[in-house]
Image (spheres, rainbow, N blue to C red):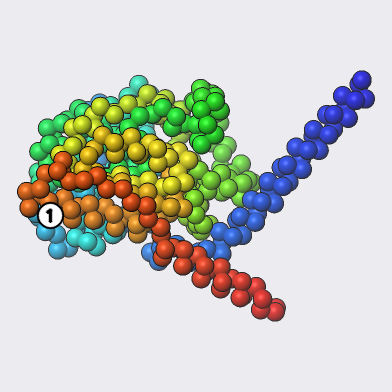
Amino acid sequence: MAGVGKAIGLGAAAAAAAGAAAAGVAADRAAMERRRLSSLDPLDGFAHTPDEVLKVIATDGLNLHVEIDTPDDLDPDLPTIVMSHGFCLSLRSWVLQRRGFVQAGYRVVLWDQRSHGESEVSEIENCTIDQLAHDLRAVIDATCPEGPLVLVGHSMGGMTTMAMTRHHPELVRDRVVAVAFIATAAGGEGLTDLGFGPLVGRVIGQVGPRLLSQLAPHQRWLAPVRRLGRNLEDVIVDRFSYDSPVSEGLIRFTADLILATRFEVMAVFIQAIQTHDELATLTALVDTEVLVVNGEGDRLTPPAQSEKIVERLPGSEHVIVRDAGHLIMLEHPEIVTGQILALVDRAEADLAAGIAVQQKPRVRRVVLDVAKGRKVRRSRARQAGSDKVPS
């Protein structure tokens, strides 16, 4: 029996080693493919220099990092676009949209949610969606106290927008002309199962925050570990962020954004997201132009979550993007930017014509990023041609 047990143990170890080797080979191949897609990266890269940087004091005294971009020929009658980023990200995740909005003539305000990006790290008890709502109000009061507003929120940023609507309905009623919810949800149930289903999801939801809290003191050792397993890290980031071919540069940018977040911050905000429920709040937006955008392949906030938002907003527009994951604004930037600009145009036109949002039909569309598909095919064709050239 001892010999059998030893054989089984050796067999299991060999299987595990073979599995790890296979995963490593697959990761290496995926990395090679992403390196061939550098032509997908923006010409100006992912860095951005804002026109203005300031600190806004939250209601609990925390410093919030805020950046503002203003076009040279700003029309003061145009609304200011205020953008709230998602969980484990920062305002840098909006880099491609902020450029497009400024080019279109709009003033843009972006901020790092507490404990994210360059904002100060919050006391744990204040890491709640309700507090984020008050933070957003503080940012608006400090940067655009007057004039019309467009609110854009991705993932947890959309939840922040919903919570602010509940806490400060007069601001939304009097000043907000349009709201864009990007890859977000009105309820937190099921959002932490990572696409593995409710059974595994419950385990992840229960164990994940506790594990992250235990790992928090050791986060300083993450950098060397990341370097050793970079290709495998890229596969994981790719799987849960994107659903179409992306470049190595974008994967690196994404991984750096996510893993810049402290583990204890991840843990506490996972719990905040799990208890998030703003379905009833959405009725306060029935008179506001609302756009809901979601990736068809989003494993974190799948289209079914967006549908729950649309069901409560009769005049809303729901756009599902094929071959798109959770970080859709980086994966298909032109589509997201274009849809938000079209939303603002609709809102301004309807306001001028006196058309009530509730009188408009609900619109649902599925779109495909044809331009990106062409770029991918051209990039692969060029690389295939170069591979055939003799050395």
Q: Position of residue 257 (x, y in %)?
A: 44, 45
The residue closer to the viewer here, 338 or 249, is 338
Q: Is residue 217 visible?
A: no
Give the crowd class for mark 1: few <14, some 14-19, many >=20 residues within 10 Å.
few
Query: Which residue appears at 23% of the width and 29% of the height?
Result: 281
The quarter of the image holding the C terminus is: bottom right
Establish if 357 lies above or below 251. Answer: above
User: Which residue lies most toward the bottom here?
Assistant: 390
Q: Secondary structure at mark 1?
A: helix
- Check disc 1 and give the amino acid type: Ala
Query: Which residue appears at 35% of the width and 21% of the height?
Result: 125
The residue closer to the viewer here, 114 or 313, is 313
Q: Is residue 163 visible?
A: yes
- Where residue 316 sits, quadrant-wise, is top left
Q: Position of residue 330 (x, y in %)?
A: 40, 53
Q: Position of residue 241 (x, y in %)?
A: 47, 46
The residue closer to the viewer here, 157 or 125, is 157
Q: Is residue 106 left or right of residue 366?
A: left
- Where residue 72 sits, quadrant-wise, is bottom left
Q: Position of residue 141 (x, y in %)?
A: 15, 38
Query: Which residue appears at 29% of the width and 28% of the height?
Result: 278
Query: Which residue appears at 51% of the width and 71% of the height?
Result: 378
Establish if 113 lies above or below 215. Answer: below
The residue closer to the viewer here, 330 or 190, is 190
Q: How many marks?
A: 1
Q: Is residue 225 left or right of residue 102?
A: right
Residue at label 1? 349
Q: Is residue 91 left or right of residue 375?
A: left
The quarter of the image holding the N terminus is: top right
